[in-house]
Amino acid sequence: MKPTNRRDVLAGLAISAGGMLAASSASASDAPASAAGHRVSPAIDGPMLTSHKPEESILFKYSMDAAEPKVTSGGWAREATAHQFPISQGIAGVHMYLNPGASRELHWHAIAAEWAYVLDGRCQTTVIDPQGRSEVLNFAPGDLWFFPRGHGHSIQTIGTEPCHFILAFDNGHFSENGTFSITDWLSLVDPQMLAQNLGVAASTFAGFPKGETYIMQGRVIPLDSPAAREVNDNVGPNTHRYCLMAQRPVREFPGGTVHLASAREFPMSSTMTGGVMKLKPGALRELHWHPNANEWQYVARGRTRVTLFGSDGRLAMSDFGPGDVAYIPRGYGHSVQSIGDEESEIVLSFDSGEYQEISLSQWLSTTPRHLLANNFGVEEEVFARFPKSQVYIAAG
Ligand code: MN
Ligand code: MN
């Protein structure tokens, strides 16, 4: 898959998750060059990169919804992997759209777990775990699923509306083009072997697809039909579903809310934490960092401004709108501001099942004032006016 906006991949240098300088995969000759011969990051829209060391600019924005989709008979998928978006080493993302009646076929992933957040429409998933337990579950907007690496699964639209959702994978090198699909597999092996395996005649497979169908168009399944019924024996920690937006937010402030599902709330989600943050116009998700995980953000609604502190004099800032993705490498300082005149809604994903953060207000409020006075070279009284506890979201 090639992004339509080639400027996005002609990024010059990007900082990888490990903090090393990494050349982008794009051809060097296509990239703009500075007088000093360093490739520089192009402006994407507006003032987005303000690094003090332009030759080390941190490109942490990717316009996923502007990328060229993979399209098959029943829908499409747009992806953001480390291939198009070099900084995104820990997490890859996909926006997938299924027509009414379409199914994303039976498949599994060898190198990543799959986390999903349903934006619109209804769908039904099937999943089988290594104990042979299977679940057939229905999803509505605001619901999550989590399929651990290797669990076989499928997704099918139910009802007459299309369904679309955001997927995140805990490996930046995962690509939707590299899934293990059942049609691909069965079209490649000898029909005689399938006949022996399944105890039917080899001719049974004559009408099967000759290659991967990926997202296949089929008949619409009405919401009230028997086919739309759930078959769910996996209650408790074995379930792959979590109804995120039906829960109370884990954090609630006048400026906004955060819904989160770590492995504590959603045990199946053992290697990822996901959530949704809503910020009222002007509100600020305060300066903070995550000691244990990379963070991936997809803007579903509104506009945000994200700052990223990469140590050693490097600060990058970028503006994001619907369909844009931000990537915050583990340990990097960052903040998120809602800059539009409508509430912004951001889908969040982290590549650890344990959620950890340290925030600026919390750090300063727990540090002795004499040390702060010495650190900043100002009077202790200055810090008497600072917050006494964690701010988390500051209203606009
Ligand atoms: Mn999948
Ligand atoms: Mn964060």
Image (spheres, rainbow, N blue to C red):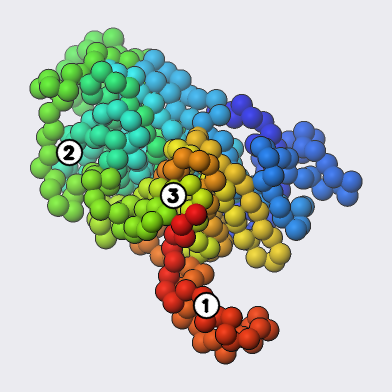
Q: Position of residue 278 (x, y in %)?
A: 40, 48
Which mark, residue 279?
3
Q: Is 86 above or below relative to 27?
A: below
Q: In the image, what residue occupies the spot 30% across and 54% down?
A: 249
Q: Earlier in the sequence, mark 3 or mark 1?
A: 3
Q: Is residue 11 above or below residue 309?
A: above
Q: Amino acid at mark 3?
A: Leu
For the residues marked 1 and 2, what is the alpha-carbon distance in whole angstroms? 54 Å
Answer with the quarter of the image where residue 229 lies: top left
Q: Position of residue 273 (x, y in %)?
A: 36, 54
- The residue drawn where x is 20% and y is 33% is 138
Callout 2 touching callout 3 (CB < 8 Å): no
The crowding category of the residue bearing disc 2, from other C-alpha atoms within 10 Å (few below 14, some 14 to 19, many at least 20), is: many
State the CA–CA distance, disc 2 to disc 3: 35 Å
Question: Residue at point 25% right, 34% down?
Answer: 140
- Mark 2 Cβ inside 8 Å of ligand 1: no
Mark 2 lies on residue = 135
Asked if one can make out residue 118 in the rendered structure from this viewpoint, the answer is yes
Q: Nearer the viewer, mark 3 or mark 1?
A: 1
* Secondary structure state at the residue bearing disc 2: strand
Identify the amino acid type marked 2: Glu
Where disc 1 sits, the SS reads helix
User: Mark 3 falls on what kind of element?
Assistant: strand
With 361 as the anchor, is 14 left or right in this view?
right
Check the picture and name the quadrant holding the N terminus. Answer: top right
